[in-house]
Amino acid sequence: MLFLCLSIPNYSLTMDEDTFKITQDLLASKGQRFLHHIIDSIPQYGFIYALSYGFFYLGEFTGNYQLNDYWNNMSEIEDLIISYLFMFMYYFLMEKYTSKTLGKYATNAMVISIDGREPTTKQLVQRSFSRWIPFDALSFLGTNGRGWHDSIANCYVVKADKFNEKKNAIIELEQIGQIGEDA
């Protein structure tokens, strides 16, 4: 029988796979997902914009405009590579260390693995690279509300409060079932 482990501080829980299911009521809505995309675009564009100004002012300060000239005259391919690398780093690092991005913080949502655990590094790499697929940003508008980057990486974006409430209820039930087992 397959077992899943969920952990919370100072307590490790082993649950039967039938005990915890990701249900539709836990999933972030399409409106939330759209808001995530809008909010998460802001720091990405902001960083590129800040780099542009930084290179300009570095040139002004040093009198050497080579970096600024290179930045402003990049080919479309170079521009795409830099943009996608930054996008990858933004999503990967935010979701690796917090299970959230700025957009998910704003709507109290989080990324979880298909089994309810924290996503693995491999899943987050898959998820971040999958965002490079054209039109992925709108793929969550489909019938199941999951983006391609969710499906490819076997992840969900859930409402954090409802997810934690359900997870804690299961943990409490499991704890009740363990009373007296140590005796």
Image (cartoon, rainbow, N blue to C red):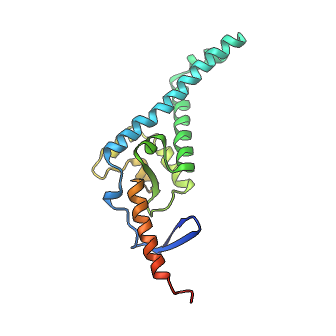
Residue 138 image position (x, y, % from top left): 35, 40
Dividing the picture into quadrants, the one containing residue 59 is top right
Name the outermost residue toward the right: 62
Residue 28 at least partly seen: yes
The answer to whether residue 55 is above or below residue 132 is above
Name the outermost residue toward the left: 143
Residue 82 image position (x, y, % from top left): 56, 30
Dividing the picture into quadrants, the one containing residue 169 is bottom left
The answer to whether residue 112 is above or below residue 39 is below
Q: Nearer the viewer, residue 22 or 129?
A: 22
- Left or right: 105 as drawn, with respect to 64: left
Q: Nearer the viewer, residue 127 or 163?
A: 163
Which residue is drawn at the image coordinates 48% and 48% (left, top)? 127
Residue 73 at least partly seen: no
Q: How many marks?
A: 0
Q: Nearer the viewer, residue 172 or 24?
A: 172
Which residue is drawn at the image coordinates 57% and 44% (left, top)? 93
The answer to whether residue 26 is above or below residue 68 is below
Residue 126 image position (x, y, % from top left): 51, 50
- Left or right: 181 as drawn, with respect to 19: right
Which residue is drawn at the image coordinates 50% and 83% (left, top)? 179
Residue 183 image position (x, y, % from top left): 56, 90
